[in-house]
Image (cartoon, rainbow, N blue to C red):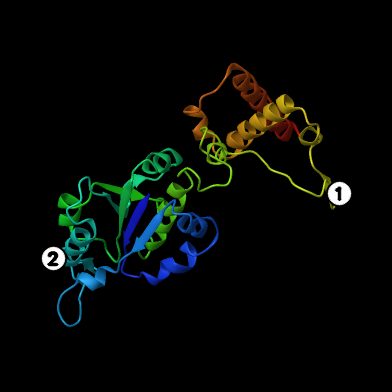
Amino acid sequence: MRIDVLPLSPAMFSAYLGESILQRAQTAGLIAVNVHNIRDYATGRHRVTDEPPFGGGGGMVLKPEPIFAAVEAVAGAATPGPRRILLSPQGRPLTQALAAALADEPWLLLLCGRYEGVDERVREHLVDDELSIGDYVLTGGELAALVVIDAVARHVPGVLGNEHAAARDSFAIGLLEGPHYTRPVVFRGHEVPAVLRSGHAGHIARWRREQALRRTWQRRPDLLLMADLAEADRRFLMTLALESVEQTNGRTTG
């Protein structure tokens, strides 16, 4: 998989891309990440990339000329070309499902916004999609691009050591992931649940499912509306609901 990134601050990428899983994935040829400086495609002695907005207002807007020039130079005349994505707080939210879908694309081009954003003609005539990593505003799209690269790369076959690891992540099955434990068995008086040490695969699987349901119920109940739930899951959620009512009544009477 090829990913090209167009930021104004390319130096922000080297440290993160040069470590851990992403570094190994690149070394193995599973993904190729190329970072290009938008400023290199600006004209004039000062290579200006931004101007004040027409109509007034605070902040600066990225000019269309260097962005179009950069995208056209990177994408060339290749057919099919890359999926062109603008990182923007106005984009559709990045989800686990969307990251998995993007991993099926052979080539992504990520355009990092900055300042007050980009000239609207970039949105209208250059990019295919806009992505947001959350309902907040960053100084620039560089961090958002790194989030997208990491989230997408995890779904590329071979990137993770265990091919089934991404399928068990939070959100992959519509639920938050349950708790994990490792050695030692007892740490400062806190013991690993006995079921995880039982060796009984069926009991372990059910415990993990129930813990995922419990954690989702407690922290992100909105996810349960769209989760694929079995009858046993629904019964367990009913148990949690009854527990919640009993706890509420206990606090009220106490």
The disc, 1 or 2, on the residue closer to the chain's N-terminal end is 2
Q: Quadrant of the C terminus?
A: top right
Q: Position of residue 183 (x, y in %)?
A: 78, 49
Distance, label 1 to label 2, CA atoms, is 65 Å
Residue 181 is left or right of residue 59, and the answer is right
Instruction: Tell whether 131 sits left or right of 171.
Output: left
Instruction: Note whether residue 196 is visible.
Output: yes
Q: Secondary structure at mark 2?
A: loop
Residue 57: assigned label:
none
Image coords of residue 242 (percent x, y): 67, 24
Depicted 203 relative to depicted 142: above or below: above
Residue at point 52% right, 32% down? 173
Which residue does the numbered mark 1 point to in the structure image?
189
Q: Nearer the viewer, residue 69 or 129?
A: 69
SS type, badge 1: loop
Residue topped by disc 2: 54
